[in-house]
Image (tube, helix red, strand yellow):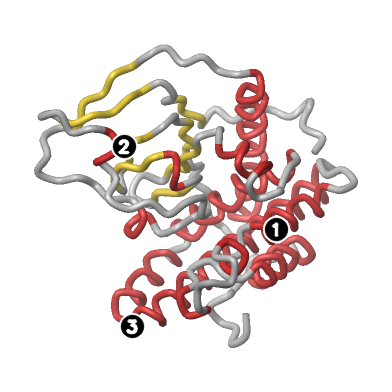
Amino acid sequence: MRLENRRESGNVEDRRGIRYGRAGGIGLGTIVLALVAMYFGQDPSVVLQGVQNQGPVQQEQVPYQETQEEAEARVLVSKVLADTEDTWDAIFQANGQTYEHPKLVLFSEGVETACGFAQSAVGPFYCPGDHKVYIDLTFYQDLRSRFGAPGDFAQGYVIAHEVGHHVQTLLGISERNMAARQRASEAEANALSVRQELQADCFAGIWAHNANESRQLLEAGDIEEGLNAASAIGDDRLTQGRAPPESFTHGTSEQRVRWFKRGYETGSVQQCDTFATRSL
């Protein structure tokens, strides 16, 4: 991506180096009750588990030594976040609305959020309770080495997908979907989760469309990087075919690629209505 002369967002909050514990000797490893490894955008009410009746959270700030790789990733995510702000500012304004910019929180090891406590193993996520995107930048090492999805655009796609969840929150989509899931069976709730995740992929595609058409940020191979990242995190690939489709919560590799491409090719929010289509 051509980000050299692009601005950085003023909405990045750096919490790296903060360590968390509980009164009474509760260790960090006992705080999170369940981890979902490296899923993007998993519903925080499911993934993140706040710990109750274990005393107050204790925080300790320790020096954090940023690596060169993390420094480069920090600048990249800040510039991508700024570009998503430009994209959604324009889209909301065209519809007579004002886009509320989300905060992006950088953390290391673990973080306290309005959705509960999370460790780095949950991967990047969005918390609708505080309108913030959370990421431990070491995730990008796994994206490259574990998932085989290198490249700056693949990293940008991660941020754009989580910002997509923020857009869903502002538009009331997340609230409506959560209410529907609470009334549904487990299989039906999973299917609704898939639709929400695929829509966030489509919204990430809208950002890519806007970044390319309005600001010419994309270079040769960027879209392929995004498609590779979307494919790498499909439920079917993550579970290596061992899980039944009715247990999927994010969609297959093919579905994630297809909806990202729809957003990129059309640039239209209306074309991203995954809840209105019968076949995903």
Which numbered disc flags the more N-terminal residue, 3 or 1?
A: 3
Front residue of 204 and 227? 227
Quarter placement of the C terminus: bottom right
Residue drawn at (33%, 49%) of the image: 129
Residue drawn at (28%, 19%) of the image: 60
**Left or right of residue 182: residue 100:** right
Amino acid carrying label 1: it is: Gly
Q: Position of residue 91 (x, y in %)?
A: 64, 55
Q: Position of residue 230 (x, y in %)?
A: 67, 58
Label 3–label 1 contact, CB within 8 A? no
Label 2–label 1 contact, CB within 8 A? no
**Which residue is under mark 1?**
205
**Which residue is under mark 3?**
185
Tell me the CA gap for discs 3 and 1: 30 Å
Which label lies toward us, 3 or 1?
A: 3
Residue 20's place in the image compared with 117, above or below, is above
Q: Quadrant of residue 138?
A: top right
**Which residue is under mark 2?**
112
Residue 112's place in the image compared with 276, above or below, is above
Q: Secondary structure at mark 1?
A: helix
